[in-house]
Image: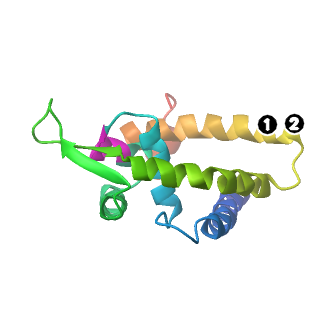
């Protein structure tokens, strides 16, 4: 049963990527990752590159590549962190906000397609369960990701 759930989650992710690609086929935002980075930056005045990558549950090298593409397309800007000279902050630009706003209607449509034939009660239940799993796994990602699968399974405090 657990393997079945894992497989179905992967399938749902793959279906969602197909739908997101349809929504993003025109314009400077080309991937779900780019869209997600901009959404996160809409909710913060600025973040360090590391903070942004961590919020999106990505490996640092992959996240930095996304940031480079967004910088190249002038959807975000970078500047020195006044509180930490070793760190660079990024923020969404006016162009990034405009591009993101133009995608909101299509992304709403993507959301409708993804939930498919679920009733509103089923959507609420699924949302609740996925948030519960996200909370659990985000803690592992941030604090325990170096543990083996066996160590993660055997931890009682997670």
The answer to whether residue 75 is above or below residue 49 is below
The residue positioned 31% from the left and 55% from the top of the image is: 60
- In the rendered image, the quadrant that contains the N terminus is bottom right
The residue positioned 60% from the left and 55% from the top of the image is: 103
Colour approach in the figure: rainbow
> At which x and y percent is residue 21?
60, 69
> At which x and y percent is residue 75?
38, 55
Under tag 1, what secondary structure? Answer: helix
User: Pointer 2: what residue?
Assistant: 121
Mark 1 neighbour class, 10 Å CA radius: few under 14, some 14 to 19, many 20 or more = few
Under tag 2, what secondary structure? Answer: helix
> Would you say residue 12 is visible in this rendering?
yes
Q: Is residue 40 left or right of residue 10?
A: left
The residue positioned 66% from the left and 54% from the top of the image is: 107
User: Pointer 1: what residue?
Assistant: 125
* Main secondary structure along the magenta-highlighted residues: helix
Q: Which of the pair 75/141 is nearer the observer?
A: 75
Marks 1 and 2, how far apart at CA = 6 Å
> Would you say residue 145 is visible in this rendering?
no
Mark 2 neighbour class, 10 Å CA radius: few under 14, some 14 to 19, many 20 or more = few
> At which x and y percent is residue 63?
35, 57
Residue 85, which numbered label?
none
Question: Residue 134 colored magenta?
Answer: no
> At which x and y percent is residue 3?
68, 58
Residues rendered magenta in the picture: 47-52
Res 85 quadrant in image = top left
Q: Which of the pair 131/8 is nearer the observer?
A: 131
Q: Which of the pair 46/151 is nearer the observer?
A: 46
Q: Are marks 1 and 2 in contact (CB under 8 Å)?
A: yes
């Amino acid at each position: 049963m657990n393997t079945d759930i894992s497989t179905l989650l992967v399938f749902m992710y793959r279906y969602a990527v197909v739908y997101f690609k349809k929504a993003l086929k025109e314009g400077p935002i080309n991937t779900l990752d780019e869209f997600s980075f901009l959404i996160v930056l809409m909710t913060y005045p600025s973040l360090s590159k590391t903070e942004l990558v961590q919020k999106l549950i990505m490996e640092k090298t992959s996240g930095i590549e996304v940031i480079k593409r967004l910088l190249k397309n002038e959807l975000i800007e970078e500047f020195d962190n006044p509180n930490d000279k070793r760190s660079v902050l990024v923020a969404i630009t006016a162009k990034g906000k405009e591009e993101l706003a133009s995608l909101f209607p299509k992304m709403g449509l993507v959301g409708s397609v993804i939930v498919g034939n679920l009733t509103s009660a089923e959507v609420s239940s699924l949302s609740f369960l996925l948030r519960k799993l996200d909370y659990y796994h985000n803690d592992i990602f941030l604090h325990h990701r170096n543990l083996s699968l066996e160590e993660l399974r055997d931890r009682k405090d997670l």
